[in-house]
Amino acid sequence: MELNQRDLRLIAAIQHGLPLSPRPYAEVGERIGLSEQEVIARIRALQARGVIKRFGVVVRHHECGYGANAMVVWDVPNGDVDEVGRRFARFPFVTLCYRRPRRPPEWPYNLYTMIHGRDRAHVLAQLAGLIEKTGAQAIAHRVLFSKRRFKQRGAQYVPPETARAPAPLKQAAG
């Protein structure tokens, strides 16, 4: 799929995040020579074409005061994993819940849940409540607290200098 210069400039302008502003699309548009409505329409078109597959928020948990982050991995019987996953995902403190294949014999876990908290005791208390309320006492699991952050940003597809290209592209009237 070929992208024009306008699309490349838009992608370069938003790939590191939107400005923290009441009108972020207007600010992006001002930087690259598009109106707020054009920015919104182009983002929607790029999503519809599959160029932008995901448009979301990257939460930097540590900066928000959540210093304890645990991936809880579960060894759920294959026939039950969808239902157990739905039950776990209903809890507001479970921020991710997804299934992955087992990697036997070392890794028997097939369901993953992420729980964030201000400290480990809080995360473990939330986990205990989840287990009790869902009847998951018999499901083998491990709690893996993160020790180090490696990456918390979106993908970079276009060199950032592309967004600063001179001479805004405007379509000729008529």
Image (cartoon, rainbow, N blue to C red):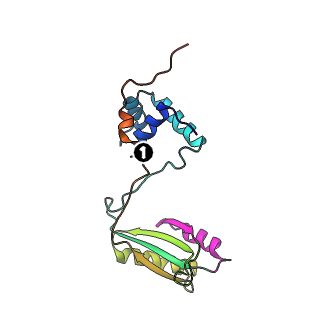
Q: In this view, does 52 lie above or below 110?
A: above
Q: Residue at x 52, y 38 (%)?
A: 43
Q: Which of 26 and 34 is in front in this view?
A: 34
**Residue at screen point 50% across, 76% down:** 73
The magenta stretch is 77-100
Query: As displayed, is residue 106 above or below residue 172?
Result: below
Q: Residue furthest bottom?
A: 138
Give the side of residue 134 with respect to residue 152, left or right: right
The quadrant in which the N terminus is found is: top right
Q: What residue is pinned by disc 1?
A: 15
Front residue of this view, candidates 28 and 136: 28
Residue 151: which quarter of the image?
A: bottom left
List x then y, in percent, for residue 101.
59, 73
Q: Residue furthest top?
A: 174
Please give left or right for residue 90 compared with residue 128 in the image: right
Q: Provide residue 56's location: percent of width, then percent of height.
A: 48, 50
Residue sitting at the far right: 79
Above or below residue 97? Residue 20 is above
Above or below, 45 against 78 in this view is above
Three-letter code for the amino acid on which mark 1 is drawn:
Gln
Give the number of marks.
1
Are there few (<14), some (14-19), or many (20+) residues within 10 Å of tag 1?
A: some
Which of the 4 image quadrants contains residue 164? top left
Residue 3: x and y in percent read: 53, 36
Q: If the image is split into quadrants, where does the C terminus sit? A: top right
User: Which element is circle 1 on?
Assistant: loop
Asked whether 3 falls inside the magenta stretch, the response is no
Q: Residue 105 in the image: x percent, y percent?
A: 55, 84
Residue at image x 50%, y 70%?
Answer: 113
